[in-house]
Amino acid sequence: MNFLEERIIKDGGVKSNTILKVDSFLNHQIDTDLLNEIGKEFKKRFDGKPINKILTIEASGIGIACITALHFGVPVVFAKKSKTSNIGNDLYTAEVESFTHNEVRTIIVSKDYLTENDHVLIVDDFLANGRALKGLISVCRQANATVEGIGIAVEKGFQNGGRIIRELGYRVESLAIVDSMNAETGAVVFRDQEIY
Ligand code: 5GP
């Protein structure tokens, strides 16, 4: 098991057969040492790619994105889920159905911060059905930016997002892939991945 899988076993919980609870270290209370390890690992896996921007979606992707960005020495852009008054009108937008809130939201990114000159690493905390990623990929396409890869902390391999996004031709690196989990027993089974 790698560091993230070990942490999920130690401090995570199975909230239902589809929701993994990691809010004591990843997306409510945040262990910054763990995020640092995640950022370091993304840097290792995507080393050599001409990445000049990290893109994520608010809110829970932002922490991982910022620490990853430190390792790459590049800025972070996060897609907003609501239009704030100071953002202007030159926007890329995409519709994203939220996994956790069960509603469709329009995500927005200012045209000032994503352009055809950008080589983007998309990062997020979870990959479930892939809708957040599809929205972020759509925004990159609108900007004619290049998606160099996608880094995910926890992929739920029993949902179909990972397959869909990989079939679109994107390289998705997930540090932990949960193949199954059981709310009654609390058991979490990870996919075997290359040890690193
Ligand atoms: P997707 O768009 O791939 O269906 O879902 C990804 C988004 O939903 C992520 O940005 C993440 O915030 C949220 N999410 C999906 N599954 C889980 C989960 O099991 N636990 C938590 N805490 N968030 C999840």
Image (cartoon, rainbow, N blue to C red):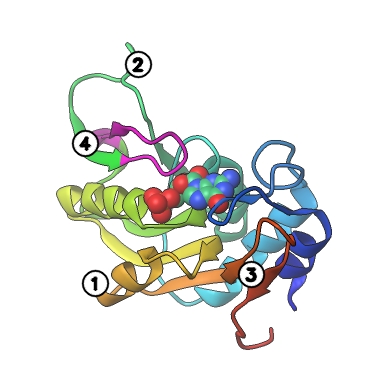
Check disc 4 and report the residue beneath it. 93
Judge from the rendering whether residue 41 lies leftward or rightward of residue 106; answer left or right.
Answer: right
Q: Amino acid at mark 2?
A: Thr
Q: CA distance from mark 1 to mark 2?
A: 32 Å
Q: Report crowding for label 4: few under 14, some 14 to 19, many 20 or more residues within 10 A (C-alpha).
A: many
Q: Is residue 92 magenta?
A: no
Q: Residue furthest top?
A: 85
Q: Report crowding for label 2: few under 14, some 14 to 19, many 20 or more residues within 10 A (C-alpha).
A: few
Q: Earlier in the sequence, mark 1 or mark 3?
A: 3
Vertical arrangement, residue 92 with respect to residue 168, above or below: above
Check disc 2 and report the residue beneath it. 84
Q: Residue furthest front?
A: 184
Q: Earlier in the sequence, mark 3 or mark 4?
A: 3
**Cβ–Cβ below 8 Å for labels 3 and 4?**
no
Magenta segment range?
A: 97-112
The label shown at residue 41 is 3
